[in-house]
Image: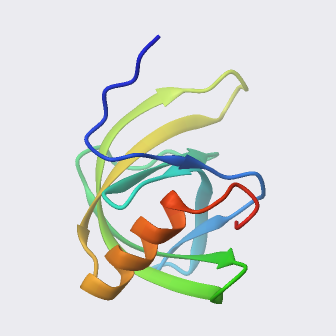
């Protein structure tokens, strides 16, 4: 199967939690990430087509740990294979130019830098 995405995505090989900035609660864990959005695995229901402010951190070998705080738009959700868990697709709608560049570099980086 060929994937036709606008931007490349990178899967994570470790747990990266996504926090809702407003509630300070974990809403899920990142499954994959691009400079334009992310897929998370969530154990709670989120409002579809809603806007959220979220925070997460990535680690790479060169820059170390970097925190991101971004505005996201909840695009879609579908049940995962595990009961009570869903996959949720988000599009970044408010992200700094510096963070966009960091994400672009991180996505293009090697698989060990997560």
Q: Residue at 47% across / 81% down in the picture?
A: 68
For residue 88, side relative to residue 25 (left or right): left
x and y, in percent, of residue 39 in the image:
48, 46
In the rendered image, the vertical position of residue 113 relative to residue 45, given as above or below: below
Residue 72 vs residue 36, the one in the foreground = 36
For residue 76, side relative to residue 13 (left or right): left
x and y, in percent, of residue 93 in the image:
21, 66
Residue 21 vs residue 58, the one in the foreground = 58
Q: Residue at 46% across / 70% down in the picture?
A: 105
Residue 15 vs residue 64, the one in the foreground = 64
x and y, in percent, of residue 64 in the image:
69, 88
**Count of all numbered marks drawn on residues in the image:** 0
User: Please, which residue is most extreme toward the top here?
Assistant: 1
In the rendered image, the vertical position of residue 68 relative to residue 80, given as above or below: below
In the rendered image, the vertical position of residue 44 relative to residue 64, given as above or below: above
When asked about the image quadrant of residue 57, the answer is: bottom right
Q: Quadrant of the C terminus?
A: bottom right
Q: How is the image coloured?
A: rainbow
x and y, in percent, of residue 6 in the image:
25, 41
Q: Residue at 76% across / 51% down in the picture?
A: 13
Q: Residue at 40% across / 46% down in the picture?
A: 8
């Amino acid at each position: 199967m060929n994937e036709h995405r606008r931007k490349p995505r990178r899967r994570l090989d470790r747990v990266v939690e996504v926090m809702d900035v407003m509630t300070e609660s974990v809403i899920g864990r990142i499954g994959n990430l691009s400079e334009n959005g992310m897929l998370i695995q969530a154990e709670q229901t989120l409002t579809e087509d809603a806007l959220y402010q979220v925070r997460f951190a990535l680690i790479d070998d060169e820059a170390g740990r970097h925190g991101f705080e971004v505005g996201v738009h909840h695009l879609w959700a579908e049940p995962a294979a595990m009961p009570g868990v869903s996959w949720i697709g988000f599009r970044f709608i408010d992200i700094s130019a510096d963070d966009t560049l960091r994400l672009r570099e991180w996505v293009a980086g090697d698989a060990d830098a997560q």
